Image (cartoon, rainbow, N blue to C red):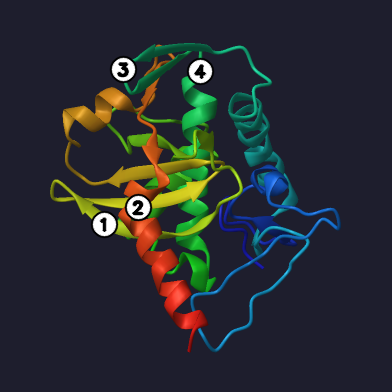
Amino acid sequence: MTCNLCQKERDLKNSHIIPEFIYSSLYDEKHRFHEISDDVKKKNKMPQKGIRERLLCLECEQHLSKYERYASLVLNGGYSITVRNEGRLVHLGNVEYLKFKLFALSVLWRASVSDLGVFCQVKLGPHEEKLRIMILNDDPGTEYQYPFILSPIIHENEVQEALIVAPTWTRLENHFAYRFVFGGIAWVFVVSGHKAPNVIINASINRNGELTMLPWELSDMRFITHMAQKLAQQSKL
């Protein structure tokens, strides 16, 4: 089969779209997590591995793993970054631009090439091929290309790490944007052939290794609460 990243004919591995380390906070003592479907006809599942699909060859799996290892250290406190609070804003520093941005873009790209229904709203069109080439060549692009913002999700003063939500698309000031929730953070990617709003670019990671996060209360994130309400309504049917 053809590897989606290198596009060579090779044996394909069961590849994670959302990296496995993200699921660690979801597992119970039997290494299972609750997978809740918003389709009333489907039963909820208790898988022991994160969502996977035959997408990549071993070499390309290893290519992406270097981004994932770095991101896991940054997100789990295993890497020395600086943190500065300014009102509600949290400014992070000493984050490697290339590794962290390519980690984020690789998740976005994998969701787009996936055939799984949970990622059906992520369709990047011509940007999918552009991202493939960038990822394959270890090219994070400029600060203006595919910026993203991070918002830690807070409930009762704690980051909600044990939450992964199917990604959705929206519009942000006339630009397409894709919203992911994993690792206790809402990730919002702006995908456009035009320059994104300055407020997005300024918050996204820059080549100086700085990025800005704006924490949000779970109850204020309408796309999440709407999904929870929908699930609650269907459970009563």
Give the residue type that dot 3 points to. Gly
Give the residue type that dot 4 points to. Val
Q: Tell me what residue is drawn at x 17 percent, y 34 percent.
A: 197
Question: Distance between the Cα atoms at labels 1 and 3?
Answer: 27 Å
Whole-percent x, y for residue 204 in the image: 34, 28
Q: Return the mark for residue 95.
A: 4
Residue found at the far front of this picture: 156
Whole-percent x, y for residue 189 in the image: 35, 44
Please name whichever residue, 196 or 72, is drawn nearer the observer in this view of the structure. Answer: 72
The disc, 3 or 2, on the residue closer to the chain's N-terminal end is: 3
- The local secondary structure at tag 2 comes to strand
The disc, 1 or 2, on the residue closer to the chain's N-terminal end is: 1
Residues at badges 1 and 4 in contact (C-beta under 8 Å)? no
- The local secondary structure at tag 1 comes to strand
Residues at badges 1 and 2 in contact (C-beta under 8 Å)? yes
Decide if residue 12 is on the left or right side of residue 108. right
Q: Return the mark for residue 33.
A: none
